[in-house]
Image: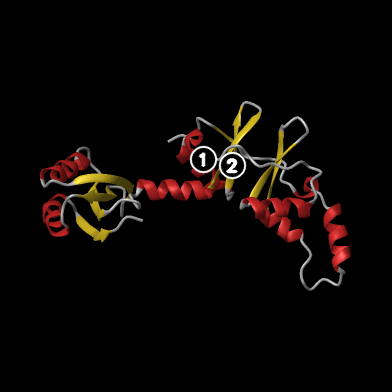
């Protein structure tokens, strides 16, 4: 899965001279939590988050009158609050690489570039949706998690056994095991009952960590 397949486009942007209050209104209206900042030529020069804006917003405890607050908010522009050094990705960046950047850098969204042109946004919400799809959360079936030896052919054996009992694997995820010699695998399997699946799989794994009926999300 590439970023270009799931990015949001077109992108809602603001200019550096946009007042803070206007930017907050845009975020609330469009239900977004970050806005790329572009100059008059459309070049990306920064990004601003809802958190940054709310941090500067007058609190209810302020002694300023409502008119003084509005005047202050009009004077504070995005240029003063934006983050100028922006992490970006391209349309052909893999989804897992984009997620890795977000996790390691502690950011919740990445502008997507095509050369110097801003063409999309990818956010943590998009990452969550992909994760749900990978884990088969929208599919009805049996959710099975097993601990197996980290050896060639183990997945093929499990897949063959599931096929032999009439099951259909609709989703699969592999994860780190309890040590360097093991892996955890989570399957979503349809067209087979829980008891039949458990009896067939048990001899092929180190242990079954979890098995349950899982409705479509």
Give left or right: position of 47 versus 131: right
Identify the residue shown where x is 27% and y is 49%. Answer: 182
Please name whichever residue, 151 or 164, is drawn nearer the observer in this view of the structure.
Answer: 164
Horizontal placement of 106 versus 210: left or right? right
Label 1 Cα crowd, 10 Å radius (few <14 / some 14-19 / many 20+): many
In this rendering, is residue 39 above or below 173? above
Q: Using residue 59 as the reference point, say whether residue 206 is left or right of it.
A: left
Front residue (pair 166, 160): 166
Disc 2 and disc 1 in contact, CB within 8 angstroms: yes
Q: Residue at x 77, y 47 (%)?
A: 78
Q: Which mark is residue 196?
A: none
Identify the residue at horizontal 49%, vertical 46% (top origin): 126
Circle 1 sits in a helix, a strand or a loop, which is it?
A: helix
Percent of width and height locating residue 136: 33, 49
As helix, strand or loop, the secondary structure at mark 2 comes to: strand
Locate residue 15: give its quadrant.
top right
User: Can you give x and y, in whole percent of width and height, for residue 88 in the image?
Assistant: 60, 37
Specify the farthest residue to the top: 115
In depth, the one of 195 and 201 nearer the eye is: 195
At a point 50% along the width and 36% down the height, the residue shown is 3
Residue 98 numbered mark, or none:
1
What is the quadrant of the C terminus in the image?
bottom left
Q: Residues within 10 Å of mark 2 (few under 14, many from 20)?
A: many
Q: Circle 2 is placed at which residue position?
A: 110
Residue 6, image x, y percentages? 49, 39
Earlier in the chain: of badge 2 and badge 1, it is 1
User: Residue 206: which quarter of the image?
Assistant: bottom left
């Amino acid at each position: 899965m590439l970023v270009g397949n799931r990015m949001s486009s077109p992108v809602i942007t603001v200019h550096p001279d946009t007042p803070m209050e206007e930017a907050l209104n845009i975020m609330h209206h469009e239900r977004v939590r970050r806005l790329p900042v572009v100059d008059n030529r459309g070049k990306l020069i920064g990004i601003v988050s809802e958190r940054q804006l709310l941090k500067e917003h007058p609190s209810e405890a302020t002694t300023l009158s409502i008119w003084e607050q509005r005047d202050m908010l009009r004077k504070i522009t995005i240029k003063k609050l934006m983050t100028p050094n922006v992490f970006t990705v391209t349309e052909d960046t893999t989804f897992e690489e984009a997620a890795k950047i977000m996790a390691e850098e502690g950011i919740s969204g990445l502008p997507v570039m095509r050369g110097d042109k801003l063409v999309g946004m990818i956010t943590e919400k998009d990452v969550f949706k992909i994760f749900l799809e990978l884990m088969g959360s929208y599919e009805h079936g049996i959710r099975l998690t097993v601990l197996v030896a980290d050896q060639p052919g183990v997945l093929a054996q499990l897949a063959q056994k599931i096929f032999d009992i009439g099951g259909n694997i609709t989703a699969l995820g592999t994860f780190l095991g309890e040590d360097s010699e093991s892996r955890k695998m989570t399957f979503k399997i349809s067209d087979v009952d829980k008891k039949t699946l458990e009896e067939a799989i048990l001899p092929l794994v180190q242990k079954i960590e979890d098995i349950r009926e899982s409705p479509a999300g």
